[in-house]
Image: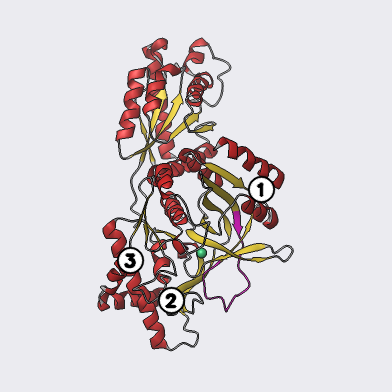
Amino acid sequence: MLEKKKYKFWFATGSQSLYGDECLQVVAEHSKIMVEGLNKSGLLPFEVIWKPTLIDNASIRQLFNDANGDEKCAGVITWMHTFSPAKSWILGLQEFRKPMLHLHTQFNRRIPYGTIDMDFMNTNQSAHGDREFGHIVSRMGIERKVIAGFWEDKTVQDRIADWMITAIGIIESSHIRVLRVGDNMRNVAVTEGDKVEAHIKFGWEIDAYNITDIAEYVQQVSQGDIDALVEEYYSSYEILTEGRDEKEFRQHIAVQAGIEIGFEKFLEEKNYHAIVTNFEVLSGLNQLPGLAIQRLMEKGYGFGGEGDWKTAAMVRLMKLMTQSISNAKGTSFMEDYTYNLEPGMEGILQAHMLEVCPSIATGKIGIKVSPLSMGNREDPARLVFTSKPGKGVATSLVDLGNRFRLLINDVECLPQDTAMPKLPVASAFWRPEPNLTTGAEAWILAGGAHHTAFSYDLTSEQMGDWAASMGIEAVFIDKDTTIRNFKNELRWNSVAFR
Ligand code: MN
C-alpha cells in the first residue's frame, strides 16, 4: 500500500553574467561536483539533480515552473555561488509551489590565504549572495528551510536528508484521502474538526461511507481467502488462546481475516489511504476491526479510532514520510491511557482498545481474543506486543475552532520489562520530555488530544517544518519546555495565527 515514488530534488545554483563566462564555467563545474558528492554520500534518501546555473529572471522563472510541472520533482535546493541579484528571483519564487531548501554553503571549506585575490572573492561569495537571496525570500514571506554549513560535512548532509523527508510530507499531504465509515464518537470533542479547512490547509480529502457499504465487501470475501489468511496469521504470530476453545478462537480470528481482506479491497478500489472506525457504528460487522486494522496500518494505511480522521491522516502522513528510511523503527496510531507515577519510573502507558501498529513492536507478536468491554459485538481478535525502546515524536493535530494547531512532543519509549499478563492489547510506555509532569501540563494547556500519531523515525524539527509549510501553528514540548514560557508562546501564537 505504500507505493515508493522515486522523487528527485533539483539543485539550482544562482549567479549572474557580470563576472564573465570564465567565472560562470567555474560556477557550473563546482555545482556539478557538489551534486555528485551529495549523491555519492549515500546519506540522502533521494537523488539530487543538477540544473544549469541561473543568471536572470527568464531562466529562474522557467526553472521554478518546470519544477512545478514535474511530478517527480519534490523540491528545489537553491544556492548562490556568486552574487545573484534577488530581483531576478521574484517572479520565479512567486510562481513556485513546492518545498524549497536554501543550502547556505560554499564550494571550498578553507580560505586559500596564500593565494586569495579579488577573482577568488568574486567567484566564491555565497556569504554575500546567499544573504541577498535570503532577503527576498523573507521579504516575500515564503516558507523555506535554511541549512548552513559545509556541504561535505556529514551533519549538513544528514540535515539535507531530514529535510527531504519533510519535503515528501509536504508534497504527499495533498494526496491523502481518508475514509470515514462511522462519524466521530458521540459526545467526544477533541476528535472533531473542520474537514473543509483540513482540505484547504493540508489537501486532505475526507469522505464518509456507510459502514454497511464496507461490511458488504467483508461479507463477500471467499472462505478460501479467509482460510489462507488465517493460516498466514497462525504461521506469523504466537497463538495465545489462554484457555479459550481452539475452534472458537480460530473462528474469531477468521472474522478479522475477512475484515482485513474486505476493508483492503474497499480502500484500494476507492483509492483511500487512511481509515477511521467507531465501535459505536458497526452494522454488518461481527467484531470491531482490531487485528485487521493493525495489519492495514503495518501496510501503510493511516488509522484513527472513534472516527478520529485528523489522527488517521497524520498517521498516514508520517508513514509516507518514513517510507524511504532504511531500518525504520515504526509509526503508529496511539493513545495516552494510564500513568505510572512512581518516582524515577514515571511514564504514560500507551495503547488503544485494539489498534496499535505492529511496526513498533519488539519481540514476539501474539494474537489474543478478549472481550472489548465496550459496545455489543463479539470478542475481537487483536495482535499483542510491547514496543521498542528509543526516542520518538508524538503529534496531535487539534482544531481550535478557528484554526489548527500541531502539538509535537519529544518522547522516549522505555523498555517494558515488567510483564502485564492480563493486558490484552499492544502497548508502549513512554516518558514525555522534559519530564512527565511538565510534559503533561504543557500538553493539556495546549489542548492536545489523547490520540496521537507517533513515530520513532521522525523528529520534532521535521514535523514543525511540515506544519510551517502548511501555514499552521506548531508548538513543541521538548527538553527546553518550561510552563511559564510555554503559556506565553501559546498566548503570542494566538495573535500570530488568528
Ligand atoms: Mn481512542
Which of pointers 1 and 2 lies earlier in the amino acid sequence?
2
Q: Is residue 258 above or below residue 58?
A: below
| Separation of marks 1 and 2 at Cα, in angstroms | 39 Å
Q: Position of residue 272 (x, y in %)?
A: 33, 56
| Residues shaded magenta | 411-427
| Separation of marks 3 and 2 at Cα, in angstroms | 16 Å
User: Relative to the observer, which residue lies in front, 299 or 121?
Assistant: 299
Per the rendering, the mark at residue 381 is: 2
Q: Chief secondary structure of the magenta span?
A: loop
Mark 2 surroundings within 10 Å by alpha-carbon count, few (fewer than 14), some (14 through 19), many (20 or more): many
Q: Is residue 371 left or right of residue 223?
A: right
Q: How many marks?
A: 3
Per the rendering, the mark at residue 263 is: 3
| Residue at 67% in and 57% down | 436
User: Which type of secondary structure does the marked residue at label 1 adopt?
Assistant: loop
What kind of residue is marked 1? Lys
What kind of residue is marked 3? Phe
Q: Which residue is mark 1?
A: 479
Task: Name which quarter of the figure residue 304 lies in.
Answer: bottom left
What kind of residue is marked 2? Ala
Task: Name which quarter of the figure residue 274 lies in.
Answer: bottom left
| Residue at 50% in and 39% down | 468
Q: Is residue 3 visible?
A: yes
| Residue at 38% in and 45% down | 203
Q: Residue furthest right?
A: 343
